[in-house]
Amino acid sequence: MEIPRPQSKQPFPAHAKKVFKGILFDVYQWEQEMFDGTKAIFERVKRADTVIVFPVLPDGRIILTKQEQPGSAPFIAGAGGRMEEGEEPEVSAQREMLEETGYEAQEMVLWNAQQPVGKVDWAVYAFIAKGLKKVADLNPDAGEKIELYPVTFDEFLKIATQENFAEREIVPFILAALADPEKKEELRKLFSPN
């Protein structure tokens, strides 16, 4: 399935130039005319797009991860990470889920795709994985300690509002579900195992 990349609310102009290439971020600058006719240098950064996956076990529990990474406080997240150059979002989601959980999925449901930060060209794709099959042990990167943390749907909603939950992009959907019983039921159905 081809998934279109979400558009930025602040796209790069055609004349933007890359002025720095980093490991995670590239910096672009361009001259911009102001309302009073003066000119100023504007700047944005670009980074690799990422995927988040919420695998759903046959019993309905959602697999979250408890993670530690060097230089960061421990956090709770879905499985996921950076997409490789040229990789499609669904392929990246399957790869990241396999590495971080040991599961493969028969079905990847796109939950949301967005560019969450105005000054950063960065798309985030959130998937719900169904039809899981355990095929391998966890294979995290050298800079990751990962423990699987299966939770019920209601536990997931509670955890997603806590400060140590890393997937900030989906929090508005969780809050909407907590505030509106109809949206909560729609979300519960989306996270059903079949």
Image (spheres, rainbow, N blue to C red):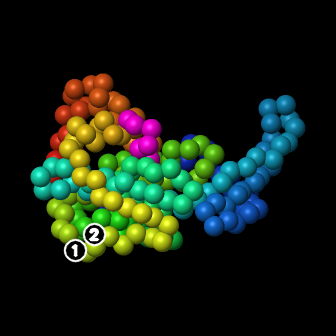
Instruction: Report x, y in % for residue 182.
Output: 21, 28
Q: Depth check: 174 or 75 in front?
A: 75
Q: Which residue is mark 1?
A: 135
Q: Which residues are magenta?
A: 161-167
The residue that appears at 25% across and 40% down in the rendered structure is 155
Asked if residue 147 is positioned above or below residue 188 in the image, the reply reads below
Tell which residue pokes out farthest to the right in this image: 38
Estimate the x, y position of residue 16 in percent, counting from the top left.
72, 56
Residue at 28% x, 69% y: name it.
102
At 49% from the left and 59% from the top, the residue drawn is 69
Whole-angstrom CA distance, mark 2 to mark 1, is 6 Å
Examine the structure image and report whether residue 62 is included in the region drawn in magenta.
Answer: no
Q: Residue furthest bottom?
A: 136
The residue labelled by disc 2 is 102
Q: Please state the total of marks drawn on the protein image.
A: 2
Q: Picture coordinates of residue 50 (x, y %)? A: 46, 58
Q: Quadrant of residue 34?
A: top right
Amino acid type, label 2:
Gly
User: Looking at numbered disc 1 in the image, what kind of residue is underneath it?
Assistant: Val
| Front residue of this view, candidates 92 and 6 | 92
Question: Which secondary structure, mark 1?
Answer: loop
Relative horizontal placement of residue 185, taking residue 11 as reference (left or right): left
Magenta stretch contains residue 165: yes
Residue 9's disc is none
Residue 178, image x, y percentages: 29, 29
What secondary structure is found at the residue carrying circle 2? loop
Whether residue 193 appears in this view of the structure is yes
Main SS of the magenta part reads loop
